[in-house]
Amino acid sequence: MWSRITYTLRETWASFKRNVTLTVAAIITSAVALLIFGLTLLMQQGFDNLLALWEDDVEMVVYVRAQASEPQREVLEGEMERQQGITIDSWEYCDVDCSLDVKDRVLAGSPEIRDRLDENTNPTFYRVVPTEGTDLAELQSLAAALVGVPSVISVNLAEDEIDLIDRLKDFVGQYTFFLSLFLLFAAVLLIWNTIRTAMYARRREIEVMKAVGATDWFIRLPFMLEGLVQGMLGGLVACGALWFINGRWTNGVAEFPISSSFQAMVVGGGDVVTTCGILMGIGALVGAIGSGIAVSRFLDV
Amino acid sequence: MIRLENVTMTYGTDVVAVREASFDVPKGEFVFLVGPSGSGKSTLLRLLNREERPSHGSVWVAGRNIADMPSGRVPHLRRNIGNIFQDYKLLPNKTVFENVAFAQQVIGKPKHVIRQQVPAVLEIVGLQDKHERFPNQLSGGEQQRVSIARAFVNRPLIMLADEPTGNLDPGTGEGIMRLLDRINETGTTVLMATHDQRIVNAMRKRVIQLDRGVIVRDQARGVYD
């Protein structure tokens, strides 16, 4: 068993060295495709951060002063109760801890700004879900009424923010997704071609192996492993590039004005690690598909 | 050891390579397959090696009908068959020792067995002193000896030789035949396709003659014509 493993690894390595140009081309193509795919995932995560306030059909966010007292909030809640069943379906209060959690996501790119926020400086807020059928004019009129309540700082309507972010998210997401799919297809073809070339270079060896009774899997395995490793190396290179780009973006965004909202587009290290895992998995899959097709198509054992 | 029963092999719809071939080869026999080019000699060897399946009929090797043998069992069948080729099919980047050892490596023989059996078989073919040479440092006859060593190292029950002397001068060819005869004397069944009239006439072994896919003669201690 051990001799078979060492044989497989040795042959895989020998094949890498023999087809170094094609192998490098296949790895670079996989890496570029996976990098674009990884950037798509991170951008989607960034857009999701921007939309964090507007999850679960929330159409309106009412910001309350950081140190608003319980009675002051009761006045606001009384106002909203009067509208319940008419324009407001439900609301949810995001208290100090909850609103600081949201800021953790939104200000991931500006930790120094986040550090300045505490229960005395960070406004809490209400997420308001309007009743079905409430139109924009009614929502604007409701917002105007609520903004007059003394503890309220401002009222943001989803209509103003979500549409823009959603459109941007869809636009960027679709184009980068299809571009990465296209490039992944190119990577599959390149790996397929590399494996085919490797098999052609070793055709006499394969012929002898078949003649002396090597099993199908013994012959196929080094080629399949080669494709798999190419895909995974592509994933590894893409991960390195993704880590670098994300680091540069995070540092760059820290210098942007807070009002630009770009801080929310920064993705934390945990998400990058998860994305890297996904990229390695897809890289392995691309390699396995490319080499698998080549082996079953050209290795008649 | 080998039995063919009414074997027909057709390529496409109208090219008949072998037609209704039937014969038995007992264990330890040496058989020449003779006939002009395209008469079906190589197709018969490919059928015995399960590189081809017959269109009709049965091919029995070592007690099993290999015509309907599942593909997964074919490698195990081939471990009992040694193949010798006209063009040797040696791996140019491997030494004599490595070329022979390769036949054992790829079927998972442990290193200590390889270290023991390869020198022994190199001694049988007379190349024990040239085990570190590469194929391009050997003569044609020596290369064919390496090919025979590789085919014999796993001690197969059957040796299939397709024109093994075709690329060699008469003197070297005779040396190869002496070697195949020695291997046959160990009990290995040998089937050899050849055009070499002189060798067939000198050896006086069983001769099966084919003409356009049909067996036209099956003669014990036969001659070429």
Image: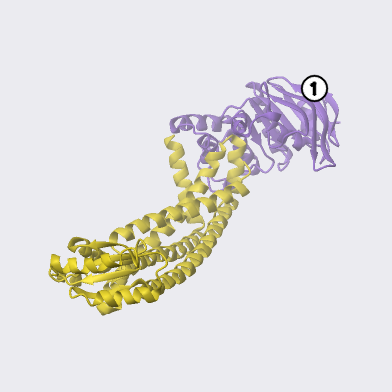
Amino acid beneath label 1: Arg
Q: The yellow chain is which one?
A: A
Q: Please tell me which residue is depicted at 78% across the width and 34% down the height of the picture.
A: B55
Q: What is the chain letter for disc 1? A: B
Q: In this view, does B147 lie to the left or right of B174?
A: left
Q: The purple chain is which one?
A: B
Q: Where is residue A248 in the image (x, y as percent from the top left)?
A: 30, 72
The residue at which mark 1 appears reads as B221
Front residue (pair A239, B215): A239
Against B96, is B60 above or below? above
Res A131 visible:
yes
Q: In this view, does A79 lie to the left or right of B121?
A: left
Q: Where is residue B153 in the image (x, y as percent from the top left)?
A: 56, 31
Quarter holding the C terminus of chain A is top right
CA neighbours of label 1 inside 10 A, class few (<14), some (14 to 19), many (20+)? some
Q: Where is residue A176 in the image (x, y as percent from the top left)?
A: 46, 68
Against A91, is B38 above or below? above
Q: Please tell me which residue is depicted at 44% across the width and 72% down the height of the picture.
A: A167
